[in-house]
Amino acid sequence: AFEAERCPGGWSAYAPAFGRFVRGIDPGVEADRRRKPGSLEDDALQDHVHEIAGAKTAGHQPQVGAPHGYDAGALGNTINETKFVRSAKVGDETRPKNVALLYCLKD
């Protein structure tokens, strides 16, 4: 990797690294043992849950004669999942901390 805008003489840009983060292979970790040097992996977000503390919702009990067969019911039925993120670092993409470098291969 080079801190430069183009590869030096005798080197070519390593196209598979364009726009990707490099992941060091750790042979002691199951996910890495399956990887081969130079293999590509698509992006992913780990499954997670958000909760909203103290949130309330209306019940939705069927009622004959109500629109679509449902009545709003009494307020105060608690939502079971009540966690949420109050202040997340957001952007137009999901990404880890990173530094921009140019990856090159020796010709």
Image (cartoon, helix red, strand yellow):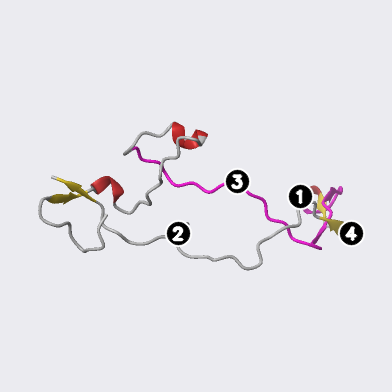
Q: According to the image, label 1 marks what residue?
A: 68
Along the line of sight, the residue nearer the viewer: 106 or 54: 106
Where's residue 1, x and y in %? 27, 54
Q: Secondary structure at mark 2?
A: loop
Few, some or many C-alpha atoms within 10 Å of disc 1 (few <14, some 14-19, many ≥20)?
few
Q: Earlier in the sequence, mark 3 or mark 4?
A: 3
- Horizontal arrangement in the rendering, residue 47 relative to residue 8 (left or right): right
Determine the residue positioned at 34% across, 37% down.
39
Q: Which residues are magenta?
A: 39-68
Few, some or many C-alpha atoms within 10 Å of disc 3 (few <14, some 14-19, many ≥20)?
few
Q: Is residue 47 magenta?
A: yes
Determine the residue positioned at 37% across, 49% down.
22
Where's residue 60, x and y in %? 82, 51
Q: Earlier in the sequence, mark 4 or mark 1?
A: 1
Q: According to the image, label 2 marks what residue?
A: 93
Above or below 16: residue 88:
below
Nearest to the eye among marks 2 and 4: give it.
Answer: 2
- Horizontal arrangement in the rendering, residue 99 relative to residue 51 (left or right): left
Q: According to the image, label 3 marks what residue?
A: 47
How far apart, in angstroms, are the residues tagged by discs 4 and 1?
18 Å
Q: Secondary structure at mark 1?
A: helix
The residue type indicated by label 2 comes to: Glu
How far apart, in angstroms, are the residues tagged by discs 3 and 4?
33 Å
Residue 74 tag number: 4
Q: Is residue 55 magenta?
A: yes
Q: Earlier in the sequence, mark 2 or mark 1?
A: 1
How far apart, in angstroms, are the residues tagged by discs 3 and 1?
34 Å
Q: Earlier in the sequence, mark 2 or mark 4?
A: 4
